[in-house]
Image (cartoon, helix red, strand yellow):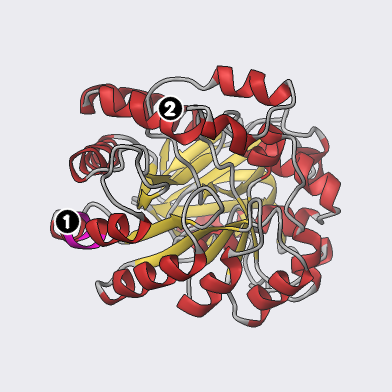
């Protein structure tokens, strides 16, 4: 039966916003004393609470002042892993570089070793706990990468864990195969041979078992070079995979590959110059900033302001992983990142709602409007500007996932 929820002091629908370029807060659609009418897991109407009463069979009254937004979307995480890299973090704070730590046996390979040693059940338990933490902080849809297995058997183990938790958990998890994270130390061959191994032995199984429709690759000095990456991505695209890329984290080599292959997004961008940002904007490739990695590594932030001013599409995600970005708090990250990059509230919230939905090719989330999924969150305040003003300390008080109360 149609259920009306409200009244809310304000509803930010995130509807009717341009999908590219800079945004001002006066472009936000704000409904005062609003209500949201839902049936099962779908939104029927959003509007003035009193005007929607006639269409409701049931009403859930919100007694306190609340501001309603779409559920947040985190489009880049690595939250299916085992172990900790606290040692790496301490070494970085002593001045040892990320690349040097990796050469010494730390970095990604350290997590690969620990993740390989974990059972699928242990991975599922850890993933479920992290997914619950995200949901409690307002993230209703979350992308999760593999990439800590780096063999057919181990990558499949991780992807199966993601699929199983997605089937059990209230949050929606979107799997991405990142078998091309680095070449594993125990692989007997060069980078090209390893990428060929993934193409021939792993990706067909990923397709057959419906474990992921997306792939990723880390294009960097200590990972994969642009030319070999492009060849790999071309073959994967022929197999029907969508493409996203770890690009320009330390060196500006990945963006051109993302544009050449027609990737959905290029993620990181800390090393991007205006040349790379313009390429992204001109080719409608989403640029995903990962401030958690910048905070974790103590490096430059991705130039989100410049990307928007060039007419690009900015999305912000946590990069939650055990090494470079262990925080995982999306709201805190976007609040601080927005302050440094001088992002409007509209630019910040669109980067984790309406524009973020583009990065995972979801057409029915990220906006509060008719026929969209009933994923929404409310904050205990009466002015939407309070949320970012508190720099991540003001968390959502009420969360609805697919029309059902989470807490």
- The residue where tag 1 is placed is 201
User: Does the stretch in magenta take in 201?
Assistant: yes
**Closest to the observer: 267 or 5?**
267
Q: Earlier in the sequence, mark 1 or mark 2?
A: 2
Mark 1 packing: few (<14 Cα in 10 Å), some, or many (20+)? some
**Closest to the observer: 340 or 48?**
340
Mark 2 packing: few (<14 Cα in 10 Å), some, or many (20+)? many
Residue 188 horizontal side relative to residue 208, left or right? right
In the rendered view, tell whether residue 83 sits above or below residue 337. Answer: above
Q: Quadrant of residue 333?
A: top right
Q: Residue at x 44, y 57 (%)?
A: 217
Give the magenta range: 199-203
Q: Residue at x 18, y 62 (%)?
A: 200
Q: Residue at x 40, y 50 (%)?
A: 57
- Main SS of the magenta part reads helix
- Dot 2 falls on a residue whose secondary structure is helix
- The residue where tag 2 is placed is 110
User: Does the stretch in magenta take in 198?
Assistant: no
Inspect this view and state whether residue 329 appears: no
In the rendered view, tell whether residue 117 sits above or below residue 228. Answer: above
Expressed as whole percent of the image width and height from the top left, the position of residue 349 reads: 68, 53
Q: CA distance from mark 1 to mark 2?
A: 24 Å
Expressed as whole percent of the image width and height from the top left, the position of residue 28 reads: 74, 63
Q: Residue at x 66, y 57 (%)?
A: 251
């Amino acid at each position: 039966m149609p259920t009306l929820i409200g009244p809310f002091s304000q509803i930010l629908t995130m509807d009717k916003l341009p999908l590219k370029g800079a945004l001002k807060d006066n472009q936000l659609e704000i409904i005062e004393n609003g209500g949201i009418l839902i049936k099962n897991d779908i939104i029927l109407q959003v509007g003035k609470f009193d005007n929607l009463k006639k269409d409701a069979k049931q009403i859930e009254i919100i007694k306190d002042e609340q501001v309603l937004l779409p559920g947040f979307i985190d489009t880049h995480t690595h939250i299916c892993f085992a172990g900790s890299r606290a040692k790496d973090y301490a070494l970085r704070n002593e001045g040892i570089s990320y690349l040097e730590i990796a050469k010494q046996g730390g970095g990604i390979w350290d997590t690969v070793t620990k993740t390989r040693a974990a059972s699928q059940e242990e991975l599922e338990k850890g993933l479920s706990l992290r997914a619950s933490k995200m949901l409690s902080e307002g993230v209703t849809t979350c992308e999760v990468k593999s990439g800590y297995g780096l063999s057919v058997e181990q990558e499949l183990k991780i992807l199966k864990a993601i699929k199983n938790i997605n089937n059990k958990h209230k949050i929606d998890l979107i799997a991405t195969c990142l078998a091309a994270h680095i070449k594993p130390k125990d692989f007997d061959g060069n980078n090209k041979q390893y990428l060929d191994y993934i193409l021939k032995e792993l990706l067909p199984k990923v397709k057959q078992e419906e474990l992921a429709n997306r792939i990723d690759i880390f294009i960097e000095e200590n990972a994969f070079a642009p030319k070999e990456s492009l060849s790999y991505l071309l073959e994967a695209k022929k197999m029907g995979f969508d493409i996203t890329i770890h690009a320009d984290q330390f060196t500006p080599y990945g963006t051109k590959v993302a544009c050449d292959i027609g990737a959905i997004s290029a993620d990181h961008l800390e090393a991007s110059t205006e040349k790379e940002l313009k390429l992204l904007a001109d080719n409608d490739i989403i640029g995903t900033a990962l401030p958690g990695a910048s905070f974790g590594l103590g490096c430059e932030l991705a130039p989100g302001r410049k990307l928007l001013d060039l007419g690009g599409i900015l999305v912000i995600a946590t990069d939650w992983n055990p090494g470079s970005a262990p925080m995982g708090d999306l709201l805190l990250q976007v609040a601080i990142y927005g302050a440094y990059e001088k992002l409007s509230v509209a630019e910040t919230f669109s980067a984790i709602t309406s524009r973020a939905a583009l990065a995972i090719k979801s057409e029915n989330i990220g906006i509060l409007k008719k026929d969209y999924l009933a994923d929404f969150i409310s904050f205990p305040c009466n002015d939407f500007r309070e949320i970012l003003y508190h720099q991540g300390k003001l968390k959502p008080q009420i969360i609805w996932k697919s029309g059902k109360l989470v807490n």
